[in-house]
Amino acid sequence: MHSIVCIKSVVLSTPKGRMSRSPEKSVLNPFDRWALEMALQIKEAHGGTVTALSMGPPASESILREAMAMGVDQGVLLCDRAFAASDTLATSRSLTAAVRHLSPFDFLLFGVCAADSDTGQVGPQTASFLDIPMVGHVTRVESANGVFTLHRQLDGFLEQYELASPPVAMTIHPAAVEPRDPTLGALGTAFDSAFPITCLDIAAVGLEPRQVGVFGSPTRVLSVKPVDKKRVCEWIQGDPAIQADILVEKLVKAGLVG
């Protein structure tokens, strides 16, 4: 079986509002660790291979090597200046082209969201572009008599989905598995320059500049500004009934309640 895990390099600290994608300031999206672990457990249970796929600048190669240290068989990086400034739609379109390039596959896995944007859109959008089933927040994958059962937990409910045959896309719930830590030896091997990472540009996956990056992104960022961290504590005096009336009045005035 072939599982493809889409992972992302995120910057968790952005001093002065400037984003740096250097390897030392970028980390593997924490939510993608669960997707990697689930793919590795599927491989251990059913055999096959696992490919880690990412899109980003050359610095993103470091998270692919980290994934390979965990046990992934192949790292693939979509790297081209044309991909820069892609929104979630253009990113999903680019990943779709790369997944088709890497096909056939059985499972396509994502983290539930990215720590830097928290949209959770790329997994479902990629599945839609590929026209394959999508199950979100998966907690367990089981197989019996050739039928795969995907368990998921969402909004307090436990659901089961039976899959007659792959491919299927899924996002992995953070409580699903415990991501393994790579050994020092595995990290040393994975970060050896002789250990290859496959790099694909826009031509390799059959896309055109108008489909990706700024030109392929309908989303527009109008402004970016630091968060106002000023806090003010105001004491409301009086008995509870008066306090409640004053509090409601202030909340309505601030537009927080209607």
Image: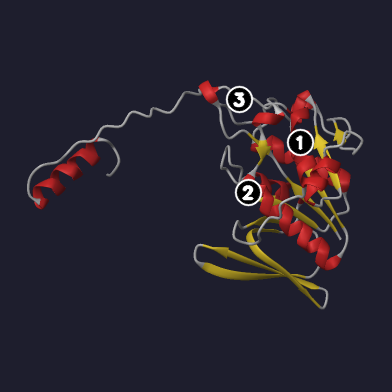
In the rendered structure, the answer to whether residue 256 lies left or right of residue 144 reads left
> Badge 3: how crowded within 10 Å, few (<14), some, or many (20+)?
some
In the rendered structure, the answer to whether residue 256 lies left or right of residue 115 reads left
Q: Position of residue 213 (x, y in %)?
A: 71, 28
Residue lying furthest left: 238
Taking depth in this image into account, of 171 and 229 the one nearest to the observer is 229
| Residue at the spot 66% in from the left edge and 37% down from the top edge | 27
Disc sitting over residue 128 in the figure: none
> Badge 2: how crowded within 10 Å, few (<14), some, or many (20+)?
many
Q: Does residue 86 lie above or below 70 as drawn? A: above
- Counting residues from the start of the chain, the first of labels 2 and 1 encountered is 2
Q: Where does label 1 land, which residue?
A: 62
Q: Where does label 3 land, which residue?
A: 19
| Residue at the spot 74% in from the left edge and 30% down from the top edge | 212
Name the residue type under label 1. Answer: Ser
* Mark-to-mark CA distance, 3 and 2: 20 Å
Q: Does residue 109 lie above or below 11 as drawn? A: below
Q: Where does label 2 land, which residue?
A: 31
In the rendered structure, the answer to whether residue 94 lies left or right of residue 201 reads left
* Mark-to-mark CA distance, 2 and 1: 17 Å
Taking depth in this image into account, of 91 and 32 the one nearest to the observer is 32
SS assignment at label 3: loop
Circle 2 or circle 1, nearest the eye = 1
Taking depth in this image into account, of 23 and 140 the one nearest to the observer is 23
Kindly indicate the quadrant of the structure image that contains residue 174: bottom right
Q: Position of residue 41 (x, y in %)?
A: 77, 62
